[in-house]
Amino acid sequence: MTKNEELTSLKKKMEEDMSLPLRSGATQLVFGEGNPDARVYFLGEGPGYHEDKLGRPFVGMAGKLLDQTLKEIGLERKNVYISNVVRFRPPENRDPEPQEIAAFQPYVDEEIRIINPEIIVTLGRFSMGKFLLNVKISAVHGKPFFVEFLGKEMLVIPMYHPAAALRRGEVLKDFKEDFKIIIKALNGEIKSSKKRETPQLELF
């Protein structure tokens, strides 16, 4: 199967999985989108109002900021892959709960396995928590971490969620500055150091 076929099959499984939470209050499943051969995989938190209506991730104001910031570093949305830790909109855009994130986790992991990106950029603390434990986003945003994930070493870069950047000017400045590290990573300027202690993946 091609990556597109695998992703289509995965989406169908999610749509048919009636055990997934948040379904009852949502319009539709919001699956990931982008280049299946992307070198960079963005993982956000969950769909909002606009995403729920259109069935696409990051299409509201936060999505526009994400698209704009990608262009500023020479990338386009079509070059990357964008997804979320939960795929149905939480009521009133509340934070996803741990058990909800855990329910979607096998599908998120499978999506990452299919895409097989070089870099995972987490947007916000809930997706950051999938890879980095006991850290605060204010302390680690924009810093590269090498973590063991799906049996191999993966470069993870935690960043603020674009919605947070829209709310606070100082966060917006950090958000845009942090994106520059993506290009450094793509250019091979960030090397793994086995001596560096990094947080390890903990399964929910």
Image: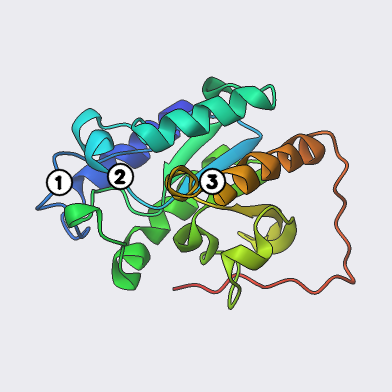
Q: CA distance from mark 3 to mark 1?
A: 31 Å
Number of the label disc, if any, that sits on residue 38:
none
Q: Does residue 98 lie above or below 20 as drawn?
A: below
- Spot occupied by residue 147 in the image (x, y as percentages of width and height): 70, 63
Q: Residue at x 45, y 48 (%)?
A: 44
Residue type at mark 1 is Ala
Can residue 165 be seen in this snapshot? yes
Q: Residue at x 13, y 40 (%)?
A: 27
Q: Residue at x 54, y 52 (%)?
A: 160
Residue type at mark 2 is Pro
Q: Residue at x 78, y 41 (%)?
A: 185
Q: Nearer the viewer, residue 102 or 50?
A: 50
Q: Which of the 4 image quadrants contains residue 13?
A: top left
Q: CA distance from mark 2 to mark 1?
A: 9 Å
Q: Nearer the viewer, residue 136 or 24?
A: 136
- Element at label 2: loop
State which tag comes first along the sequence, 3 or 1.
Answer: 1
Q: Does residue 44 lie above or below 8 as drawn?
A: below
From the image, tell me which residue sits under label 3.
169
Number of the label disc, if any, that sits on residue 26:
1
Horizontal side of 186 relative to 139 (left or right) equals: right
Q: CA distance from mark 3 to mark 2?
A: 23 Å
- Spot occupied by residue 25 in the image (x, y as percentages of width and height): 11, 51
Number of the label disc, if any, that sits on residue 47:
2
- Element at label 1: loop
Q: Which of the 4 image quadrants contains residue 201?
A: bottom right
